[in-house]
Image: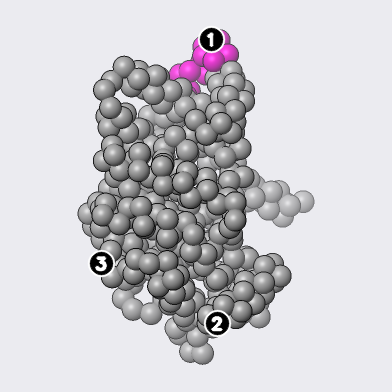
Amino acid sequence: MLLSLVLHTYSMRYVLPAAVMLGTAPTYILAWLGWRLFSFFLPGTRLYREVDDRFYTIYQSMVLFFFENYTGVQVKLYGDLPKHKENIIYLSNHQCTVDWIIADILAVRQNALGHVRYVLKNGLKWLPLYGWYFSQHGGIYVKRSSRFNEMEMRNKLENQMDSDTPMYLVIFPEGTRYNPELTKVISASQIYAAEQGLPVLKHVLTPRIKATYVAFDCMKNYLDAIYDVTVAYEGTVDQMGKRKEAPSMAEFLCKECPKVHIHVDRIDKKDVPEDLSSMRRWLHDRFEIKDKLMREFYDSSDPQNRNKFPGKCVDSKLSLKKTLPSLLFLGGLTASMLMTEAGRKLYVKTWIYGTVIGCLLVSFKV
Ligand SMILES: *[C@@H]1O[C@H](CO)[C@@H](O)[C@H](O)[C@H]1NC(C)=O
């Protein structure tokens, strides 16, 4: 009885953060919408984007409060750790939705949190409230392989470059998550690599070139670098030492991942080949490097070397000053809205109409 109560409370640990993160969404969307409408009276889109990035910084700092301070996760950084803002494409292996937050974890340490924009799977555009907003914030929804709309992606990136939008563009080239339990997905990906005459990878899927190529080709004069990021969640092995599925956001918030290891290679843009076929080979080489890092992490013959990447490791703790003010601000704003009858009505309407209208707008690519 007591045990089940304890277990129950334990698994409920994600309820509070989820309630706050979702609960503040209507407040955020309303404030942003006000600014969006006002900005139609302003010349150009530059100021709109600057303020939008600040808004986004506030929301995501609050998110980071939960993912870093609340979970108490230890962030272990390896490799190149750029301190300053720059325009980049961020290429990462993909295992779970927490990977989105890892991009925030790195960006906030460079004061670039507001500039994080994602290349996302098309289906995610239907997420209530968030789906449409992500696209307004510079996110790009893409469909798979032959249905990939290259022109649309180029147009979107060009618009952003025209208004000098700082770019922290996150791409997961595997196109889907690596889940060790989905052996069919993994073997299909390995067979594809073998057919193409490429080395077969074990801990990551064979990367797809399309989004990375289009993004780089379109922005090569605008970018400073590519960050090649490899992420490993500690504790994702079973008793036999075999790799298991990475934590979901809810599991992560239940403090199920005590340490996250992040390896960054900063690649200057001049070192990235420009034509499609060399770039495809280059991207595969980068994923071979990731695969090697992951093998060290999971399979190293010396147990001393397991659960870490090779090389120097820096423990990185985020100051509460970067996250707490945003939590208090958004939380306070939402609470004061919910205290009045009219506020509560507006709040509920924002959820309902925001979701419906957001879905309509995003389906018409507005
Ligand atoms: C979270 O914030 C509290 C309050 O300042 C602090 O004592 C604690 O060390 C922080 N935890 C982490 C993991 O940063």
Which one is earlier in the sequence, the residue at label 2 or at label 1?
2
- What residue appears at the point 34 percent right and 40 percent down from the top-left corner? 160
Q: Which residue is mark 3?
A: 270
Q: Amino acid at mark 3?
A: Lys
- What residue appears at the point 55 percent right and 28 percent down from the top-left corner? 361
Asked if residue 36 lies left or right of residue 192, the reply is: left
- Dot 3 alpha-carbon crowd within 10 angstroms: few under 14, some 14 to 19, many 20 or more: few
Q: Which residue is mark 2?
A: 197
Q: CA distance from mark 2 to mark 3?
A: 26 Å
Q: Amino acid at mark 2?
A: Gly
Q: Return the x and y of residue 263 as percentages of the image width and height.
A: 38, 68
Instruction: Report if the CB atoms under discs 2 and 1 are less than 8 Å apart.
Output: no
Q: Mark 1: which secondary structure?
A: helix
Q: Mark 2: which secondary structure?
A: loop
| Residue extending furthest toward the left | 84
Q: Nearer the viewer, residue 253 or 227?
A: 227
Asked if residue 297 lies left or right of residue 3, the reply is: left
- Above or below, 247 against 363 in this view is below
Question: Is 189 in the magenta?
Answer: no
Q: Given this view, does label 3 or label 1 mark the residue nearer the observer? A: 3
| Residue extending furthest toward the top | 342
Q: Mark 3: which secondary structure?
A: helix
Give the residues drawn in magenta, as a range: 333-346
Q: Nearer the viewer, residue 166 or 63?
A: 166
Q: Which residue is mark 1?
A: 342
Task: Please indicate, yes or no, whether residue 255 appears anywhere in the rendered image.
Answer: yes
Q: Return the x and y of residue 279 as percentages of the image width and height.
A: 40, 69
